[in-house]
Amino acid sequence: MADVLTFTDRGIYCPAGDFYIDPWQPVDRALITHGHSDHARWGTNQYLATAAAAPVMRHRLGDVSLDTINYAETRQIGGATVSFHPAGHVPGSAQIKVTVKGETWVASGDYKTVADGLSEPFEPVRCHAFITECTFGLPIFKWTPENILTTQINDWWAANKAAGKTSVLGAYALGKAQRLLTTVNAEIGPILTHGAIENTNDILRGQGIALPDTIRVTAETNVKDYAGALVLATPSAMAGSWMKKFGPTSTAFASGWMALRGVRRRRGADRGFIVSDHADWDGLNAAIKATGAEKIFATHGYTDAFHKWLREEGYDAHVVSTEYNGEDTTEADDV
């Protein structure tokens, strides 16, 4: 039986349906797992994504031809039957299930298996073949439990406020920043946001997602009016002159890479919170097992090590080269 999905220099391709999944080159038709810029790229003629992912994609890509689909809704595209299922990565993110002549493959995009109270919770999808990320595909990567993470961040913020410092926390503009907003205690002080983060907040609020009140940082913002504030910033902003307006600060990054002390030192932050919108080691293994798939394709991350591990576990595992970034160590801005 021919492969349901193939791997090309433009992206993951379905010959039976003549479409691509998250292509990194312009194509005629693309099915998009979520709105991060390494998965939803400009230049394609026709896009299909979940209704919840569409507002961010329109914000980023402009006036493109974008059709939407609900979770678990079935659609026939040529000789392929497709459906989208929650990936738990960011709001609207999806795994894409493709069935051709009775054989089912799932392209997971990016995913996490722990519910965060913001994204639609991950749902395992039974399949014959599973395309998985392995951004954090080593046993060292295990995320801080949500209740402990919440306490850590709030205690850090409260201590900084008592010391007369502004707390500046670096995070992606889509997904992680909003997830952090749902964990912090807004009674500690005001919450300020970088413009890129606040733009995304506005979009998600417009979709009915509840977030605490935040204040956009502008050129006119006077930090003295917001004593003891928490500032959510994009990583690039934290490295530039934008930071000067906040006076004495304590800085932190929220990232899976904070599990590696060397990365934490290189970033020069006072604190590192170990949290990610990608699956950790246990999450990756649990997700793969739940699919029931025998054939596994590992992409973007520790592909060689994770592929070796999967083979030792008895899977028919393969490494696939893609242009997805996962969560890279520099935490580049997104959206």
Image (spheres, helix red, strand yellow):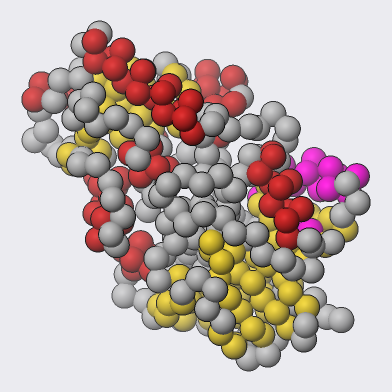
Please, is residue 77 above or below residue 274 in the view?
below
Residue 124 in view, yes or no: yes
Please, is residue 65 above or below residue 289 in the view?
below
Spot occupied by residue 259 in the image (x, y as percentages of width and height): 59, 26
Q: Quadrant of the N terminus?
A: bottom right
Spot occupied by residue 116 in the image (x, y as percentages of width and height): 47, 44
What residue lies at 41% left-to-right and 23% top-to-bottom?
A: 151
Per the rendered image, the range of residues in magenta is 296-312
Please, is residue 184 above or below residue 73 in the view?
above
What residue lies at 70% left-to-right and 86% top-to-bottom?
A: 16
* Residue 54 quadrant: bottom left
Residue 22 in view, yes or no: no
In the rendered image, the residue lying farthest to the bottom is 78
> Position of 14 compared to 166: left or right?
right
> Position of 311 compared to 38: left or right?
right
Spot occupied by residue 255 in the image (x, y as percentages of width and height): 50, 34
What residue lies at 35% left-to-right and 23% top-to-bottom?
A: 154
Please, is residue 216 above or below residue 222 in the view?
below
Q: Is residue 304 magenta?
A: yes
> Position of 120 compared to 138: left or right?
left
What residue lies at 49% left-to-right and 60% top-to-bottom?
A: 93
In the rendered image, the residue lying farthest to the top is 163
Spot occupied by residue 40 in the image (x, y as percentages of width and height): 48, 64
Q: Is residue 166 magenta?
A: no
* Residue 50 quadrant: bottom left
